[in-house]
Amino acid sequence: MKKRLILFAKIAVSVSLLLYLLSIVDLGATVQRLRETKLAYCVAAFFISMLMIFLSSLKWKIILAADGVRSRYPMLLQSYYIGNFISLFLPSGIGGDVYRVYNLSSAGKQVGKVTSSVLFDRLSGLGALLSISLFGYLALAGTRYDAALFALYLAGIASFFAMTAQGVVRTLSGSRFVAARYLGALLASFRAYRSKPGAFLAIVAIAFTFQFLIVFNNFLYTRALSIDISMTQLIVIIPLIFLTEVLPVSINGAGVRDSAFVFFFVQIGHTKEEGLAMGLLVIAMRYLCGLVGGTVLLASAFRTRKREASPE
Protein backbone atom coordinates (compact mmCIF):
# COMPACT_ATOMS: atom_id res chain seq x y z
CA MET A 1 0.00 0.00 0.00
CA LYS A 2 2.81 2.37 0.95
CA LYS A 3 4.65 1.70 -2.33
CA ARG A 4 1.50 2.47 -4.30
CA LEU A 5 1.00 5.74 -2.46
CA ILE A 6 4.60 6.74 -3.20
CA LEU A 7 4.12 5.83 -6.87
CA PHE A 8 0.90 7.83 -7.09
CA ALA A 9 2.59 10.77 -5.38
CA LYS A 10 5.43 10.68 -7.93
CA ILE A 11 2.95 10.54 -10.79
CA ALA A 12 1.07 13.49 -9.31
CA VAL A 13 4.30 15.53 -9.04
CA SER A 14 5.32 14.78 -12.63
CA VAL A 15 1.88 15.47 -14.08
CA SER A 16 1.41 18.65 -12.02
CA LEU A 17 4.77 20.08 -13.05
CA LEU A 18 4.21 19.26 -16.73
CA LEU A 19 0.76 20.84 -16.68
CA TYR A 20 2.17 23.93 -14.97
CA LEU A 21 4.90 24.25 -17.60
CA LEU A 22 2.36 23.96 -20.39
CA SER A 23 0.34 26.74 -18.77
CA ILE A 24 3.21 29.25 -18.62
CA VAL A 25 4.85 28.71 -22.02
CA ASP A 26 3.80 29.49 -25.56
CA LEU A 27 3.26 25.91 -26.68
CA GLY A 28 3.05 26.93 -30.34
CA ALA A 29 6.48 28.57 -30.18
CA THR A 30 7.92 25.52 -28.43
CA VAL A 31 6.55 23.13 -31.07
CA GLN A 32 7.77 25.38 -33.87
CA ARG A 33 11.29 25.40 -32.47
CA LEU A 34 11.23 21.60 -32.24
CA ARG A 35 10.01 21.36 -35.84
CA GLU A 36 13.00 23.40 -36.95
CA THR A 37 15.47 21.07 -35.20
CA LYS A 38 18.68 20.61 -37.19
CA LEU A 39 18.94 16.82 -37.32
CA ALA A 40 22.66 16.68 -38.12
CA TYR A 41 23.47 17.78 -34.56
CA CYS A 42 21.13 15.13 -33.16
CA VAL A 43 22.79 12.41 -35.26
CA ALA A 44 26.19 13.45 -33.90
CA ALA A 45 24.81 13.39 -30.34
CA PHE A 46 23.36 9.90 -30.94
CA PHE A 47 26.73 8.43 -31.88
CA ILE A 48 28.40 10.18 -28.95
CA SER A 49 25.77 8.59 -26.69
CA MET A 50 26.70 5.17 -28.07
CA LEU A 51 30.37 5.92 -27.35
CA MET A 52 29.40 6.83 -23.79
CA ILE A 53 27.91 3.36 -23.26
CA PHE A 54 31.19 1.80 -24.40
CA LEU A 55 33.11 4.02 -21.99
CA SER A 56 30.75 3.22 -19.10
CA SER A 57 31.10 -0.50 -19.71
CA LEU A 58 34.89 -0.15 -19.73
CA LYS A 59 34.77 1.76 -16.45
CA TRP A 60 32.60 -0.94 -14.90
CA LYS A 61 35.05 -3.62 -16.03
CA ILE A 62 37.96 -1.74 -14.43
CA ILE A 63 35.98 -1.34 -11.18
CA LEU A 64 35.19 -5.05 -11.05
CA ALA A 65 38.77 -6.07 -11.87
CA ALA A 66 40.10 -3.85 -9.06
CA ASP A 67 38.02 -5.92 -6.63
CA GLY A 68 39.13 -9.25 -8.08
CA VAL A 69 36.03 -9.90 -10.21
CA ARG A 70 36.87 -11.11 -13.70
CA SER A 71 34.29 -10.28 -16.36
CA ARG A 72 34.00 -10.24 -20.14
CA TYR A 73 33.61 -6.83 -21.72
CA PRO A 74 30.94 -7.90 -24.27
CA MET A 75 28.74 -9.18 -21.42
CA LEU A 76 29.12 -5.92 -19.49
CA LEU A 77 28.37 -3.90 -22.62
CA GLN A 78 25.21 -5.92 -23.26
CA SER A 79 24.16 -5.56 -19.62
CA TYR A 80 24.67 -1.79 -19.77
CA TYR A 81 22.62 -1.40 -22.96
CA ILE A 82 19.75 -3.48 -21.60
CA GLY A 83 19.90 -1.76 -18.21
CA ASN A 84 19.62 1.66 -19.85
CA PHE A 85 16.61 0.47 -21.83
CA ILE A 86 14.85 -0.92 -18.74
CA SER A 87 15.46 2.32 -16.81
CA LEU A 88 13.40 4.24 -19.36
CA PHE A 89 10.22 2.39 -18.42
CA LEU A 90 10.49 2.20 -14.65
CA PRO A 91 9.48 4.86 -12.09
CA SER A 92 13.06 5.09 -10.85
CA GLY A 93 16.35 5.29 -12.73
CA ILE A 94 17.88 2.56 -10.56
CA GLY A 95 15.93 -0.17 -12.37
CA GLY A 96 18.75 -0.57 -14.86
CA ASP A 97 21.28 -0.86 -12.05
CA VAL A 98 19.22 -3.62 -10.45
CA TYR A 99 19.23 -5.47 -13.76
CA ARG A 100 23.00 -5.13 -14.07
CA VAL A 101 23.48 -6.60 -10.59
CA TYR A 102 21.05 -9.44 -11.37
CA ASN A 103 22.57 -10.21 -14.76
CA LEU A 104 26.15 -10.41 -13.54
CA SER A 105 25.37 -12.24 -10.30
CA SER A 106 23.35 -14.77 -12.33
CA ALA A 107 26.55 -15.47 -14.23
CA GLY A 108 28.18 -16.63 -11.00
CA LYS A 109 29.76 -13.41 -9.80
CA GLN A 110 29.66 -12.54 -6.10
CA VAL A 111 26.52 -10.47 -5.60
CA GLY A 112 28.06 -8.28 -2.88
CA LYS A 113 31.01 -7.25 -5.01
CA VAL A 114 28.81 -6.73 -8.07
CA THR A 115 26.45 -4.52 -6.06
CA SER A 116 29.40 -2.50 -4.75
CA SER A 117 30.75 -2.08 -8.28
CA VAL A 118 27.44 -0.76 -9.63
CA LEU A 119 27.06 1.64 -6.70
CA PHE A 120 30.61 2.94 -7.11
CA ASP A 121 30.03 3.27 -10.84
CA ARG A 122 27.11 5.59 -10.05
CA LEU A 123 28.91 7.49 -7.28
CA SER A 124 32.01 8.09 -9.42
CA GLY A 125 29.77 9.56 -12.11
CA LEU A 126 27.98 11.73 -9.55
CA GLY A 127 31.31 12.93 -8.19
CA ALA A 128 32.51 13.86 -11.67
CA LEU A 129 29.21 15.61 -12.37
CA LEU A 130 29.50 17.74 -9.23
CA SER A 131 33.16 18.45 -9.96
CA ILE A 132 32.49 19.70 -13.49
CA SER A 133 29.65 21.90 -12.25
CA LEU A 134 31.86 23.36 -9.49
CA PHE A 135 34.79 24.04 -11.82
CA GLY A 136 32.47 25.65 -14.34
CA TYR A 137 30.97 27.84 -11.60
CA LEU A 138 34.40 28.90 -10.34
CA ALA A 139 35.41 29.79 -13.91
CA LEU A 140 32.57 32.32 -14.20
CA ALA A 141 33.33 35.93 -13.42
CA GLY A 142 31.85 37.52 -10.30
CA THR A 143 30.83 34.30 -8.53
CA ARG A 144 30.38 34.19 -4.75
CA TYR A 145 31.28 31.64 -2.07
CA ASP A 146 34.17 30.30 -4.20
CA ALA A 147 36.40 29.47 -1.22
CA ALA A 148 33.58 27.90 0.80
CA LEU A 149 32.41 25.72 -2.08
CA PHE A 150 35.94 24.56 -2.89
CA ALA A 151 36.58 23.78 0.78
CA LEU A 152 33.37 21.74 0.88
CA TYR A 153 34.46 19.93 -2.26
CA LEU A 154 37.83 19.01 -0.75
CA ALA A 155 36.09 17.89 2.45
CA GLY A 156 33.96 15.50 0.42
CA ILE A 157 37.03 13.95 -1.20
CA ALA A 158 38.74 13.65 2.19
CA SER A 159 35.62 11.97 3.62
CA PHE A 160 35.74 9.28 0.95
CA PHE A 161 39.34 8.38 1.79
CA ALA A 162 38.62 8.54 5.53
CA MET A 163 35.59 6.24 5.25
CA THR A 164 37.57 3.71 3.22
CA ALA A 165 40.55 3.68 5.59
CA GLN A 166 41.63 0.20 6.66
CA GLY A 167 40.77 0.80 10.32
CA VAL A 168 37.20 1.91 9.52
CA VAL A 169 36.64 -1.05 7.20
CA ARG A 170 38.02 -3.51 9.76
CA THR A 171 35.88 -2.09 12.56
CA LEU A 172 32.67 -2.20 10.57
CA SER A 173 33.37 -5.65 9.15
CA GLY A 174 33.85 -7.04 12.67
CA SER A 175 30.74 -5.41 14.13
CA ARG A 176 28.00 -7.48 15.71
CA PHE A 177 25.41 -5.48 13.78
CA VAL A 178 24.44 -6.92 10.41
CA ALA A 179 23.96 -3.49 8.78
CA ALA A 180 27.43 -2.41 9.89
CA ARG A 181 28.96 -5.58 8.42
CA TYR A 182 27.20 -4.96 5.11
CA LEU A 183 28.54 -1.40 5.12
CA GLY A 184 31.98 -2.77 5.94
CA ALA A 185 31.85 -5.11 2.94
CA LEU A 186 30.77 -2.23 0.71
CA LEU A 187 33.58 0.02 1.93
CA ALA A 188 36.07 -2.85 1.61
CA SER A 189 35.27 -2.96 -2.10
CA PHE A 190 35.58 0.82 -2.32
CA ARG A 191 38.96 0.55 -0.61
CA ALA A 192 40.02 -2.07 -3.16
CA TYR A 193 39.21 0.34 -6.00
CA ARG A 194 41.20 3.26 -4.60
CA SER A 195 44.09 1.07 -3.42
CA LYS A 196 45.08 0.41 -7.03
CA PRO A 197 46.25 3.83 -8.28
CA GLY A 198 46.27 2.93 -11.97
CA ALA A 199 42.74 1.54 -11.90
CA PHE A 200 41.45 4.37 -9.71
CA LEU A 201 42.86 7.06 -12.00
CA ALA A 202 41.36 5.29 -15.03
CA ILE A 203 37.95 5.16 -13.30
CA VAL A 204 38.11 8.87 -12.48
CA ALA A 205 39.29 9.79 -15.99
CA ILE A 206 36.46 7.85 -17.64
CA ALA A 207 33.91 9.31 -15.22
CA PHE A 208 34.99 12.86 -16.07
CA THR A 209 35.07 12.09 -19.80
CA PHE A 210 31.55 10.64 -19.62
CA GLN A 211 30.12 13.65 -17.79
CA PHE A 212 31.87 16.10 -20.12
CA LEU A 213 30.34 14.27 -23.08
CA ILE A 214 26.91 14.71 -21.49
CA VAL A 215 27.50 18.46 -21.41
CA PHE A 216 28.85 18.42 -24.96
CA ASN A 217 25.80 16.49 -26.18
CA ASN A 218 23.60 19.16 -24.63
CA PHE A 219 25.71 21.78 -26.42
CA LEU A 220 24.87 19.96 -29.66
CA TYR A 221 21.17 20.02 -28.72
CA THR A 222 21.29 23.78 -28.23
CA ARG A 223 22.80 24.12 -31.70
CA ALA A 224 20.14 21.79 -33.09
CA LEU A 225 17.49 24.12 -31.65
CA SER A 226 19.37 27.30 -32.73
CA ILE A 227 19.80 28.39 -29.10
CA ASP A 228 22.94 30.44 -28.48
CA ILE A 229 24.40 29.27 -25.16
CA SER A 230 28.10 29.04 -24.40
CA MET A 231 29.79 25.81 -23.39
CA THR A 232 30.89 27.46 -20.13
CA GLN A 233 27.31 28.21 -19.14
CA LEU A 234 26.26 24.66 -19.97
CA ILE A 235 29.09 23.24 -17.87
CA VAL A 236 27.51 24.97 -14.88
CA ILE A 237 23.80 24.38 -15.46
CA ILE A 238 23.62 20.94 -17.13
CA PRO A 239 25.06 19.03 -14.14
CA LEU A 240 22.64 20.89 -11.86
CA ILE A 241 19.71 20.07 -14.14
CA PHE A 242 20.62 16.40 -14.31
CA LEU A 243 21.09 16.25 -10.56
CA THR A 244 17.37 17.01 -10.19
CA GLU A 245 16.68 13.61 -11.77
CA VAL A 246 18.29 11.97 -8.75
CA LEU A 247 15.59 13.40 -6.47
CA PRO A 248 13.05 10.61 -5.76
CA VAL A 249 10.03 12.86 -6.19
CA SER A 250 8.89 12.14 -9.74
CA ILE A 251 8.62 9.44 -12.40
CA ASN A 252 12.12 9.16 -13.83
CA GLY A 253 12.64 12.91 -13.50
CA ALA A 254 9.65 13.81 -15.69
CA GLY A 255 8.44 17.29 -14.95
CA VAL A 256 11.27 18.01 -12.53
CA ARG A 257 13.94 17.86 -15.22
CA ASP A 258 11.85 19.93 -17.65
CA SER A 259 11.16 22.52 -14.95
CA ALA A 260 14.88 22.71 -14.22
CA PHE A 261 15.63 23.36 -17.90
CA VAL A 262 13.07 26.17 -17.98
CA PHE A 263 14.30 27.67 -14.70
CA PHE A 264 18.00 27.72 -15.56
CA PHE A 265 17.44 28.88 -19.13
CA VAL A 266 15.48 31.86 -17.84
CA GLN A 267 18.24 32.58 -15.31
CA ILE A 268 20.83 32.92 -18.08
CA GLY A 269 18.65 35.15 -20.25
CA HIS A 270 16.75 32.72 -22.46
CA THR A 271 13.04 32.05 -22.84
CA LYS A 272 10.85 29.50 -21.12
CA GLU A 273 9.97 28.11 -24.54
CA GLU A 274 13.63 27.47 -25.31
CA GLY A 275 14.08 25.73 -21.98
CA LEU A 276 11.06 23.48 -22.50
CA ALA A 277 12.08 22.66 -26.07
CA MET A 278 15.51 21.69 -24.81
CA GLY A 279 14.06 19.44 -22.11
CA LEU A 280 11.76 17.72 -24.60
CA LEU A 281 14.57 17.17 -27.10
CA VAL A 282 16.82 15.70 -24.41
CA ILE A 283 14.22 13.15 -23.31
CA ALA A 284 13.32 12.29 -26.93
CA MET A 285 16.97 11.57 -27.71
CA ARG A 286 17.28 9.54 -24.52
CA TYR A 287 14.44 7.26 -25.58
CA LEU A 288 15.81 7.03 -29.12
CA CYS A 289 19.20 5.91 -27.79
CA GLY A 290 17.43 3.55 -25.39
CA LEU A 291 15.86 1.72 -28.33
CA VAL A 292 19.32 0.34 -29.08
CA GLY A 293 19.20 -1.35 -25.69
CA GLY A 294 15.76 -2.71 -26.55
CA THR A 295 17.22 -4.23 -29.72
CA VAL A 296 20.04 -5.79 -27.70
CA LEU A 297 17.46 -7.21 -25.24
CA LEU A 298 15.45 -8.80 -28.06
CA ALA A 299 18.58 -10.27 -29.64
CA SER A 300 19.67 -11.68 -26.27
CA ALA A 301 16.23 -13.23 -25.67
CA PHE A 302 16.25 -14.72 -29.16
CA ARG A 303 19.68 -16.29 -28.64
CA THR A 304 18.63 -17.71 -25.27
CA ARG A 305 15.46 -19.20 -26.72
CA LYS A 306 17.40 -20.68 -29.65
CA ARG A 307 19.87 -22.35 -27.28
CA GLU A 308 17.08 -23.79 -25.17
CA ALA A 309 15.31 -25.12 -28.26
CA SER A 310 18.40 -26.74 -29.76
CA PRO A 311 18.88 -30.47 -29.02
CA GLU A 312 21.59 -31.51 -26.57
Image: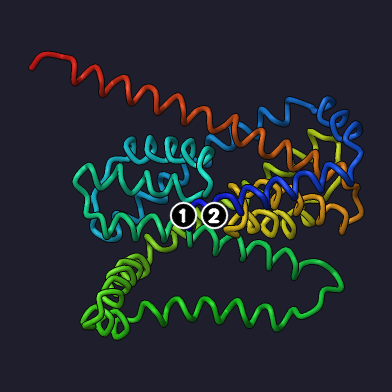
Q: Residue at x 77, y 41 (%)?
A: 278
Classify residue 3 as left or right of residue 12. Answer: left
Amino acid of disc 1: Met
Q: Position of residue 47 (x, y in %)?
A: 59, 31
Classify residue 24 as left or right of residue 165. Answer: right
Asked if labels 2 and 1 touch by Cβ distance under 8 angstroms, the answer is yes
Name the secondary structure under disc 1: loop
Please determine whether, in this image, residue 27 is positioned above or below residue 98: above
- The disc label shown at residue 50, or none: none
Name the secondary structure under disc 2: helix
Q: Position of residue 210 (x, y in %)?
A: 55, 49
Q: Which residue is drawn at 54% across and 64% down?
A: 127
Amino acid of disc 2: Leu
- The disc label shown at residue 1, or none: 1
Quarter occupied by residue 269: bottom right
Label 2 CA crowd tier, 10 Å (few <14, some 14–19, many 20+): few
Distance between the alpha carbons at the discs numbered 1 and 2:
6 Å
Quarter occupied by residue 30: top right
Q: Name the residue under label 2.
A: 5
Q: Where is residue 207 in the image (x, y as percent from the top left)?
A: 51, 55
| Count of numbered tags | 2
Nearest the viewer among 207 and 268 is 268
Q: Residue at x 80, y 43 (%)?
A: 276
Q: Position of residue 144 (x, y in %)?
A: 81, 78
